[in-house]
Amino acid sequence: MKGNSSGKLTIYILVAMVLGIGVGYFVHLNSAPETIKSISSNLKLLTTIFLRLVQMVIAPLVFTTLVVGIAKLGDLKTVGRVGGKAMLWFISASLLSLLLGMLLVNFFKPGNAINLDSADLEGAKDLIGKTQEFSVQKFVEHVFPKSIFEAMATNEILQIVIFSIFFGVGTAALGEPGKVVVKALDATAHIILKMVGYVMNFAPLGVFGAIAAVIATKGLEVFSFYGKYLFSFLVGISCLWVLLLTVGYIILGKRLFALLKAISQPLLIAFSTTSSEAVFPKLTTELEKFGCKDKIVSFILPLGYSFNLDGSMMYMTFASLAIAQAYGIHLDMGTQLTMLLVLMLTSKGIAGVPRASLVVVTATCAMFNIPPEGIALIIPIDHFCDMFRTMTNVVGNALATTAVSKWEGELSPASEA
């Protein structure tokens, strides 16, 4: 029954995508610019409702599952070992993604094909307004919470993770009295996962709104204007998938195909809503069904959402250097490698909002004397790039979680799962 309803939801999402393209294109062809803007804003409300419903459950889900997971892991030594393995994967995958983006943008030079007249200056103003200059102090403030309530209110996943680790270790150290808290939080986590099932029923509406709004505004012509840029990026994403899935096959063997099948619905939702956050709760459930132990999933997945955004990482070097190419700014290899390391730091914790990586790209451009308003050049095609990079983020995190589960001997055989 569950599998059937899950299959139905996937069909509804696919239908919503097709309808979104059709409705969006009809509006684009038959409406005046002002009308398009108004209809697009109203269509986006459907996506806003869905994303806000998902964001509503993110903070309590991360907190409850992570505390329970750490308490079940037992001691600080185990937490350190599992966390160490996860960070080894995250850092390796991030560097690989950033390097791949850098190599491909230098090979294809998509920035040379971008017409400076096609800039979306209105969208750029909004992004530049959100950009803050990177500093060590701001990075530290972003990582360590001043108040858990503030972190939960703003859905700062990384800050919630830090608090939950301390809380979970403290609960485990308490022994018997701590078990009461763990039991209560475990029950709360299951209630929230039940809520997730209800929230996911709104996914087709969110998908329809997101696709229809962007097609209504940009039209299908955007693909011909930005053909080379989009093609180069898709080659990069394809290479990244090949690398990730090859490593996944080495670790998981034939179970990799079962994993891809298990996460197909989260991948579809991520692709169509361009929000990794939208699938966090559903991905948690699917990975546990696949055979990963709940204590590993609840520890690795929230960390992955802050440290392991492979698709976004690749795009950040790709987009930053493409903007430099569009302006005819030459950056030597040393400067490009420095940019890569800066992006490694500045990109942590950007999973929360769609297109957040554009804010990081804007800040990076400003740091390396590339005109930050150059972000306007890639905004018209960004939504379509975001669909692919968000889906890649989900694959990367699913692989990281299953890989660490396998290394820890905590991946149930297919029959048990």
Image: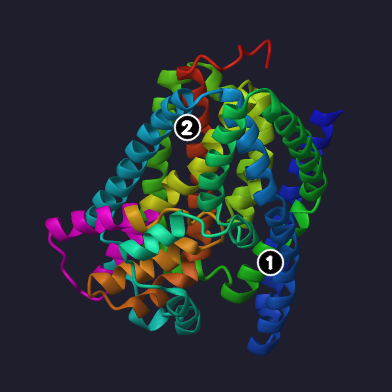
Residue that carries the numbered disc 2 in the rendered image: 400
Amino acid carrying label 1: it is Ala
> Which numbered disc, 1 or 2, marks the residue closer to the eye?
2
Instruction: Give the mark count.
Output: 2
Q: Residue at 58% of width from left, 40% of height from top?
A: 167
Q: Position of residue 183 (x, y in %)?
A: 75, 29
Front residue (pair 366, 37): 366
Q: Position of residue 224 (x, y in %)?
A: 46, 67
Element under disc 1: helix
324 is within the stretch colored magenta: yes
Q: Quadrant of residue 273?
A: bottom right
- Characterize the local packing of mark 1: few (<14), some (14-19) or many (20 or more) Cα atoms within 10 angstroms: many
Q: Residue at 83% of width from left, 36% of height from top?
A: 5
Question: Residue 312's mark?
Answer: none
171 is within the stretch colored magenta: no
- Highlighted magenta segment, given as a residue range: 315-344
Cα–Cα span, label 1 and label 2: 33 Å
Quadrant containing the C terminus is top right
Quadrant containing the N terminus is top right
Question: Residue 212's mark?
Answer: 1
Q: Quadrant of residue 230?
A: bottom left
Is residue 166 left or right of 226 when viewed as pictured? right
Magenta span dominant secondary structure: helix
Amino acid carrying label 2: it is Ala
Front residue (pair 126, 298): 298
Is residue 33 left or right of 165 when viewed as pictured? right
Q: Residue at 22% of width from left, 75% of height from top?
A: 369
Image position of 36 with respect to 84: above or below: below
